[in-house]
Image: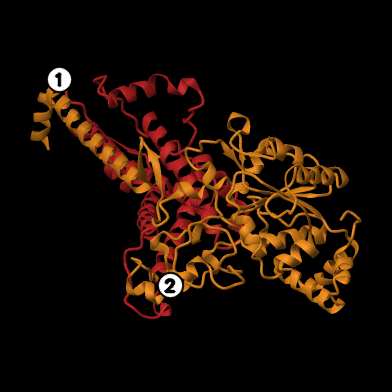
Chain colours: A red, B orange
C-alpha cells in the first residue's frame, strides 16, 4: 500500500453534524440517566430549597433528550429527502431477500474470517447498515418513545402524555416502562464498543481513513502495491 | 328491599333532615372532584333514582378490599350499605348464607337484569377449570361468567381483580387471571390497590349512581379522578427528591429528617394512586408518611417487580435473578471481549497472509 490516489467526499456536513451531536447527546443521556436511576451524591444536611441535586440532573437529561430527538428527526429528514447517496435509506432494503444476498453474505463472511478478501465500501457496508438500523434507528426510536411517555407522566393530560402515554399500558405499567428504558439504554455502550472497534479495524485493514472521515468528510483510496 | 326506594326516601325514613341530605351530596361532589355546580345533579339523582343494586363477589383474594371498604370514614360503612347502595349479595358481610344467599343473587340478577353493578373482589383461577377457587358449590370462574352476563357494569376491586396481584405472580400455580381477561363484553372499572383506599371505592360507586355511567377512565381502565397522578407527584417529600436528599438506610439521620425514600426502593414515581392525596384511615397517614417506601401495590404485577427495597427490579435472566444493569454490563463486557478476540484473530490472519506488504508499509510510512 502506498500513496493516496483518490479522495472521496463521503460524509456531508449534515451527516457529520448529526453524528457528533448524537454522540454527545447519547453520552450525556447515558450518564445523567444512570445518575437519575442511582443518585450517589447526597447533599449535606439542610433545607431542601437550598439544593437541586436531582432536578438538575433531570433537567440535563430532558434537555439532552429533546436535542437528541430533534437531531434524530433531522437525520431522518436527511435520510429520506436529502440529496446524499451515502446517507439515504435508498439502498437499505432488509425486507427484500435480494438485500441479504451476495454483498451482505460476503461482508459477514469477511467479518467472521470465512473469506480472505475484505469487501470495500465507500459508504456503509450492508452489515454496518443493518447494525445501524437495529441499534441506532430502532434503539433510538424506542428510547425516544419510552422517554417521552415517561416525561408525559409529569403532566397528565399534557402533550407527551396524550401522544406517547400509550407506551405505558403497552409495556405493562409505568414501572415496566422505566425498567425497559433502563435496560435498553445498554445497547448504546454495547453499540459504541462494536462501532469503535469496527471503525478502527477498517482503518487499519483497509486504510481508507474512515476514522478521520467523520470529521473531515473524506475517505481515501490508497494505491495498491504490486505483488 | 326491592320496592325501588330512592336514596332520598331512605334518608327521610331514617330521620335525616334535608339539610343533612344536602350536606351529604356536597361532600360526595367534593370526593368525586366535581365542581359545586354539580351538587344539584347529585341531589336530583339521589331523589329520583332507585338505589343501585350491587352484587359483590369474592374470588381468589384476601378480603383486604372489604376490610378497607368497611373503614371508609366519609361516608361511613353504615351510610354506604344502608343508604347509598343496595348491597344485596356479599358473601362476607351478608347475614344469610348458603342456598339462601345464592338465591338472593339469582333473584337480583333476574329482577334487575342489566341494571345491577357487579363488584368483584379477587381474581379468577382459570387452571383446571377453575377448581382452585370454589364458592357456593361452583367454580368462581362459572359464577363470575354467570353473574357478569346481565350486569350493567363491573367494578374490579383491588389489584387482584384489576391486574392479578400476588395470586398471578410468577409462577402463578392456579392460573389466576384478572376480571378483564375473563369478561370482555362489559365495561370494567379497575380500582387497583392492595387494598384500594376506602374513599376511592365509595367514590366510584357514588359516581355510577349519580350519573348512571362509569367515571371517566384512563388508559388502564382506572377512574381518572383517583388514578391520574402518581404518588410521587403529590408526595410531601417531593422537595427532598428534587433536592437530591435521600434516605440511604433505615436508621440514618436522613430517615429521622424525613427525606425522600427513592433510594430505599420507593415505587412512588411509577405508581398511580391517591395515597399521597386522600391518604388512609380517614386521612391519618400513608406508607411514605409513616417512613416506608411505596411498594407500588396499585401497579400491574408489582410482586414481580421486586425487591421492594431496590430501585431496579430483579428479572429472570438465564435462570438466575439479575437486574438491568447487570445484564447490560454482561452484554457490554461480552462485546468488548468479542472485539478484543476479533482484533487478535485479525492481527494473526493479516500477519500470516501479508507479511510482505506489512513490512513494506512500515518502510513507506
Disc 1 is placed on an element classified as loop
Looking at this view, is A10 or A96 the one in front? A96
Task: Provide residue A134's location: percent of width, then percent of height.
Answer: 43, 37
Reply above or below: B87 against A2.
Answer: below
Mark 1, Cα crowd under 10 Å, few <14 / some 14-19 / many 20+, is few
Provide the residue designation for mark 2: B240
Q: Are marks 1 and 2 on the same chain?
A: no
Q: Distance between the residues labelled 1 and 2?
A: 72 Å
Q: The C terminus of chain B lies in which quarter of the figure? A: top left
Q: The N terminus of chain B lies in which quarter of the figure? A: bottom right
* Residue B209 shows in this picture: yes
The numbered disc on residue A227 is 1
Reply above or below: B234 against B303.
Answer: below
Mark 1 — on which chain does it sit? A
Mark 2 — on which chain does it sit? B
Q: Which residue is drawn at 31% across and 47% down?
A: A216
Looking at this view, is B10 or B31 the one in front? B10
Q: Residue at x 14, y 24 (%)?
A: B354
Q: Which residue is drawn at 47% across and 52% down?
A: A178
Amino acid at each position: 500500500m502506498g500513496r493516496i490516489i483518490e479522495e472521496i467526499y463521503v460524509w456531508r456536513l449534515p451527516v457529520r453534524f448529526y453524528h457528533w451531536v448524537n454522540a454527545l447527546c447519547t453520552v450525556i443521556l447515558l450518564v445523567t440517566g444512570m445518575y437519575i436511576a442511582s443518585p450517589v451524591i447526597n447533599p449535606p444536611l439542610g433545607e431542601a430549597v437550598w439544593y437541586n441535586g436531582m432536578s438538575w440532573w433531570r433537567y440535563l437529561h430532558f434537555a439532552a433528550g429533546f436535542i437528541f430527538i430533534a437531531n434524530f428527526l433531522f437525520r431522518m429528514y436527511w435520510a429520506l429527502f436529502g440529496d446524499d447517496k451515502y446517507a439515504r435509506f435508498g439502498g437499505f432494503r432488509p425486507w427484500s431477500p435480494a438485500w441479504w444476498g451476495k454483498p451482505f453474505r460476503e461482508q459477514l463472511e469477511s467479518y467472521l474470517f470465512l473469506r480472505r478478501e475484505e469487501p470495500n465500501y465507500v459508504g456503509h457496508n450492508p452489515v454496518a447498515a443493518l447494525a445501524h438500523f437495529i441499534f441506532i434507528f430502532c434503539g433510538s426510536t424506542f428510547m425516544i418513545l419510552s422517554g417521552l411517555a415517561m416525561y408525559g407522566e409529569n403532566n397528565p393530560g399534557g402533550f407527551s402524555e396524550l401522544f406517547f402515554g400509550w407506551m405505558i399500558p403497552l409495556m405493562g405499567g409505568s414501572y415496566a416502562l422505566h425498567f425497559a428504558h433502563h435496560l435498553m439504554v445498554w445497547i448504546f455502550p454495547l453499540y459504541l464498543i462494536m462501532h469503535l472497534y469496527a471503525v478502527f479495524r477498517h482503518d487499519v485493514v483497509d486504510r481508507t481513513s474512515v476514522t478521520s472521515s467523520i470529521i473531515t468528510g473524506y475517505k481515501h483510496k490508497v494505491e495498491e502495491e504490486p505483488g | 328491599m326491592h320496592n325501588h326506594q330512592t336514596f332520598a326516601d331512605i334518608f327521610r325514613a331514617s330521620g335525616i333532615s334535608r339539610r343533612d341530605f344536602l350536606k351529604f351530596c356536597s361532600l360526595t361532589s367534593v370526593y368525586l372532584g366535581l365542581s359545586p355546580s354539580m351538587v344539584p345533579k347529585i341531589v336530583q339523582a339521589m331523589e329520583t333514582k332507585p338505589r343501585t343494586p350491587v352484587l359483590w363477589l369474592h374470588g381468589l383474594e384476601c378480603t383486604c378490599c372489604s376490610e378497607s371498604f368497611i373503614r371508609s370514614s366519609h361516608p361511613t360503612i353504615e351510610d354506604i350499605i344502608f343508604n347509598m347502595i343496595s348491597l344485596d349479595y356479599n358473601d362476607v358481610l351478608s347475614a344469610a348464607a348458603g342456598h339462601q344467599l345464592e338465591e338472593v343473587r339469582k333473584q337480583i340478577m333476574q329482577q334487575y337484569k342489566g341494571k345491577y353493578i357487579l363488584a368483584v373482589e379477587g381474581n379468577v383461577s382459570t387452571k383446571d377449570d377453575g377448581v382452585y377457587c370454589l364458592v357456593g358449590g361452583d367454580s368462581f370462574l362459572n359464577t363470575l361468567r354467570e353473574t357478569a352476563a346481565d350486569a350493567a357494569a363491573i367494578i374490579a376491586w383491588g389489584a387482584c381483580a384489576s391486574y392479578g396481584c400476588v395470586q398471578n405472580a410468577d409462577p402463578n400455580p392456579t392460573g389466576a387471571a384478572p376480571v378483564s381477561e375473563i369478561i370482555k363484553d362489559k365495561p370494567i372499572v379497575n380500582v387497583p390497590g392492595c387494598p384500594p383506599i376506602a374513599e376511592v371505592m365509595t367514590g366510584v360507586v357514588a359516581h355510577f349512581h349519580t350519573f348512571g355511567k362509569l367515571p371517566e377512565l384512563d388508559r388502564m381502565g382506572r377512574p381518572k379522578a383517583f388514578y391520574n397522578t402518581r404518588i410521587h407527584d403529590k408526595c410531601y417529600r417531593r422537595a427532598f427528591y428534587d433536592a437530591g436528599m435521600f434516605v440511604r438506610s433505615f436508621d440514618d439521620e436522613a430517615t429521622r429528617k424525613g427525606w425522600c425514600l427513592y433510594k430505599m426502593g420507593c415505587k412512588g414515581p411509577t405508581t398511580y394512586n391517591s395515597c399521597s392525596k386522600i391518604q388512609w384511615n380517614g386521612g391519618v397517614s400513608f406508607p411514605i408518611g409513616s417512613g416506608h417506601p411505596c411498594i407500588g401495590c396499585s401497579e400491574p404485577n408489582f410482586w414481580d417487580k421486586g425487591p421492594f427495597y431496590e430501585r431496579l427490579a430483579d428479572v429472570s435472566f438465564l435462570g438466575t435473578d439479575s437486574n438491568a444493569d447487570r445484564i447490560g454490563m454482561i452484554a457490554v463486557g461480552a462485546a468488548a471481549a468479542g472485539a478484543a478476540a476479533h482484533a487478535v484473530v485479525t492481527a494473526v490472519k493479516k500477519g500470516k497472509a501479508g507479511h510482505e506488504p506489512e513490512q513494506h508499509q512500515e518502510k513507506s510510512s
